[in-house]
Image (spheres, rainbow, N blue to C red):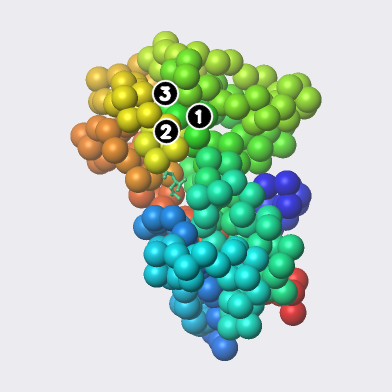
Amino acid sequence: MADLSVAEIDDLIVTSQDIIRSPEKYRDICRYKKLATLFFEPSTRTRLSFEAAMYELGGQVLGFSEASSSSAAKGESVADTIRTVCCYADIIAMRHPKEGAPTVAATHASVPIINGGDGGHNHPTQTLADLLTIKLEKGHFEGLTVGLCGDLKFGRTVHSLVHAMCRYPGVRFVLISPEELKVPSYVKLPLKEGGVPYDQTTDLVSVLPELDVLYMTRVQRERFFNEDDYVRLKDSYILTSEKLTCAKPDLSIMHPLPRVNEISTEIDPDPRACYFRQALNGKYIRMALILKLLEESA
Ligand code: NCD
């Protein structure tokens, strides 16, 4: 998120809103341009929304959806894969299990590189989708109390969201997690440095009435060293209709998805449940991002 200023984020949101209003204006804008999606880790929303975004801009898509079908399986380095893909594509979106892999990729690339998730570190395009969702649901960021709940240690979407939202005035965070899955200290650093208010707790229900946004997350099984720890922690928080009775009537319930057990499906018809609208918004904001990066690299 550090690569984008608040003004640039706001511009991406404005472009996305224009795309939602007038999609026909954008139908051919990326004609003859190619997006490569290089996914070394599983994905449904991120990869498919990137691909749908490029198709809706009139462009084309190539790539792979698992490391095993790329030359990474033969031992090729990220640097060499990227140098090669730059021969074939105008822009690259990648996901990789190693923290920092997209930064390495960017140093070897002649086209823009977008981080679609790097290990347990960051997931900036999910954050852009989250910000667009909050903007559409709430109308503003200023003054919101945002609860982040679940695996705050390995949950990369939370790390990027904190980094972005703490730059808007009056935002307060409530960090809700088991002791073992607390947010890493490097994520809290900008909160401390910027004097951004935050509370930490293990108890979701006691803080629920204060929240304007509740951002639920999955316990990140693939990042655990030990399956027993995962099994012990996986159902730490399960949001049910009963728990929601004490929440604000205009609470926005978000989740980057995939969901495992964190939100009971009985909540899905509740108008406060935004997570599938959030997945749709991911396509619009990625359209805006592809456009911006292609314009800048032209
Ligand atoms: C998230 C991710 O990959 O970090 N999913 C997504 O991109 N929407 C969240 C998760 O996997 O739990």
**Which image quadrant for residue 253?**
top left
Discs 1/2, front: 2
Residue toward you, 184 or 128: 184
The residue that mark 2 highlights is 224
**Which image quadrant for residue 68?**
bottom left
Separation of disc 1 and disc 3 at Cα? 23 Å
Separation of disc 1 and disc 2 at Cα? 13 Å
Could you tell me the amino acid type at mark 3? Answer: Lys
Judge left or right: residue 212 versus residue 228: right
Residue for point 58% across, 41% down: 121
Residue for point 76% across, 49% down: 5
Marks 2 & 3, CB-CB < 8 Å contact: no
The residue that mark 1 highlights is 152
Residue for point 43% across, 27% down: 150
Judge left or right: residue 212 versus residue 102: left
User: Residue 226, can we see it?
Assistant: yes
Above/below status of 270 relative to 125: above
Rendering coords of residue 239 (x, y %): 31, 26
